[in-house]
Image (spheres, rainbow, N blue to C red):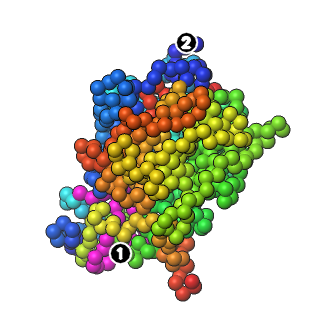
Amino acid sequence: MECCGPGYSSPSEAIKAPREKLLYTIAIYTGTGIQKPDYLATVDIDPDSETYSQVIHRLEMPGIGDELHHMGWNACSSCFDDGSMSRKYLLLPGVRSNNIHIVDTATDPRAPILHKVIDGNDIKSKTDLSGPHTVHCLGSEIIISMLGDAKGEAPGGYLHLNKDFEIQGRWENSMGDIKFGYDFWYQPRHNIMVSSEWAAPNTFMPGFDLEEVGHLKYGRELHFWDFEKKEPIETMYLGEDGLLPLEVKFHHDPDSSHGFCGAALSSNVIHWWKDDTDKWQWEKIIDVENEPHPEWPLPVPGVMSAILVSMDDKYLYLNNWLHGDMRQYDISDPHNPKLTGQVWMGGLLGKAPYVNGVKMAGGPQMFQLSLDGKRLYVTTSLFSTWDNQFYPEIREQGGVMVMIDCDPINGGMTLNKDFIVDFGKEPNGPSRCHEARYPGGDCTSDIWL
Amino acid sequence: MTLVTLENRGGKTFEVNSKRPILETLRDQGVDLPFGCKYGGCITCAAKLISGKVDQKRQVALNNRQINDGYIILCVARPLTDITIKIGVESHDSLYRNPFLDPLEPHELKADIARSKEDE
């Protein structure tokens, strides 16, 4: 179906989109000892191009110390019927500086340009919010989860921007009893939004103290929101099964009520759905066991910092950042996932210290899947201070982007031998790549109304 | 006027206004320093105090072990005396610790949740 707005009429149409040729990833110098701005890297992922598997452009932010992290589009398939909108701008929040950078990727997709910066201090003074994380668009409006108030204390709230990137104030009408914020995803046909919990910026930004988990400084709850009323209606207490519930993903099918969250420290996948009596239920469907380490007194948790659902809703991908493996599960029956693929890259267990000749520092961390479900791009850095704790060698070696070939028909994952981007070799010194996006939309951006 | 000496910049010394944060006064004089949040919450600007005293009551990033190891948060710390510090990531040798290898004692936690050593 042809229309005039951005994105695709449905997930099944998105799967048929042309193959991605460019990929954007942020790369940081914050916390690395190199006094340069963080930047947006354009990576050539067209195998027919002479510069395949290379960084072909770098857009530096105006200042240092932002810690770019996640990104989001100004518009997605939720604006498919709106001819006045286009997927032109990528929003790059700085978790530490609070600045939000608006980047024009459409004028020259290979060489994006900075369009506007929303000053972090302006956001603080107008909304009492800091610590920007997840960016979603809501039709022509934009909301961003902010993990703290202006002083970095939880729970923060949601920043509302209009389509011209002007601060509209707080999006939510109430935070209810929510203790922390992090990620969120919404499913409009069920009038539901689900949000998760990391910690206050003042807790997670300086690094991870395990002892603070026991002192309830990190989250263990999921929150269900009345999306239209913009207020929380129900909390799921996950307890020990859900320590640090981070990434939230619904099925892409807008009629589905099924969704998933990866609890990073427990290294579990939590599944929720609406039952026959319209009640929200949850269960743990994947439990990655801690692994013994030859030299550590404590067993090592997987640290499942990200999850992703393929556009056809058939596969769930997850990482174990400390163990070093990426996994693919068939979730055709979301109550009974089946492990169908696994790839090792880096990690602390010594299973894959080198990938395609590059010595790994870090483990699989963020990833983005192609719309057709065949190519998964994976990066290795989590967050500057946490990297420095668990993988101090990343300072000298930098981050890495690898590609995993995925079989969307029969399941299975294989490390691609021809692709690797070594951010240890960047012109200004080793940087660290994190989240990635494709110009045409991706598996973590689009929502259908 | 108060003097700030940078031990790992050849002992270079700067005169600063002791009422303003050290990060600000050093950057104004051309010292290239890392920073992030600029309100004492994110640890990016941490430096090591070698001698002298600072007021860093506004910082919330450091746990008690890091404070005992001499770390200060330059974006909010103000010198109370002449000080000598080590700056940048070269000073971060004991700032970051693997929490599974090297757990904190109850008295080494951040101030708001730490127990005093006598109560342990």
Q: Assess whether residue B54 is covered by the magenta stretch.
A: yes
Residue type, numbered disc 2? Glu
Residue A117 image point, x, y percent: 37, 39
Residue type, numbered disc 1? Gly
The residue located at (23%, 57%) in the rendering is B32
In front of the other: A442 or A405: A405
Residue A225 image point, x, y percent: 68, 42
In front of the other: B3 or A291: A291
Image height check: is B46 above or below A288? below
The residue located at (34%, 44%) in the rendering is A357
Residue B70 is marked as 1
Decide if residue A119 is on the left or right side of residue B86.
right
Label 2, residues with CA under 10 Å away: few <14, some 14-19, many ≥20 = few
The residue located at (48%, 33%) in the rendering is A405
Label 1, residues with CA under 10 Å away: few <14, some 14-19, many ≥20 = some
Give the magenta range: B32-58
Which image quadrant is residue A307 in?
Answer: top right
Q: Residue furthest top?
A: A2
In front of the other: A46 or A293: A293
Residue A226 image point, x, y percent: 70, 40
Residue A188 image point, x, y percent: 66, 31
Circle 2 marks a residue in which chain? A
State yes or no: discs 2 and 1 in contact (Cβ < 8 Å).
no
Image height check: is A262 above or below A7? below
The residue located at (37%, 26%) in the rendering is A47
Which image quadrant is residue A334 in?
Answer: top right
Asked which secondary structure carries label 1, the reply is loop
Circle 1 marks a residue in which chain? B
Which image quadrant is residue B30 in?
Answer: bottom left
Dominant secondary structure (helix, strand or loop) of the stretch shown in magenta: loop
Write down the residue under mark 2.
A2
Placement of the N terminus of chain A among the 4 image quadrants? top right
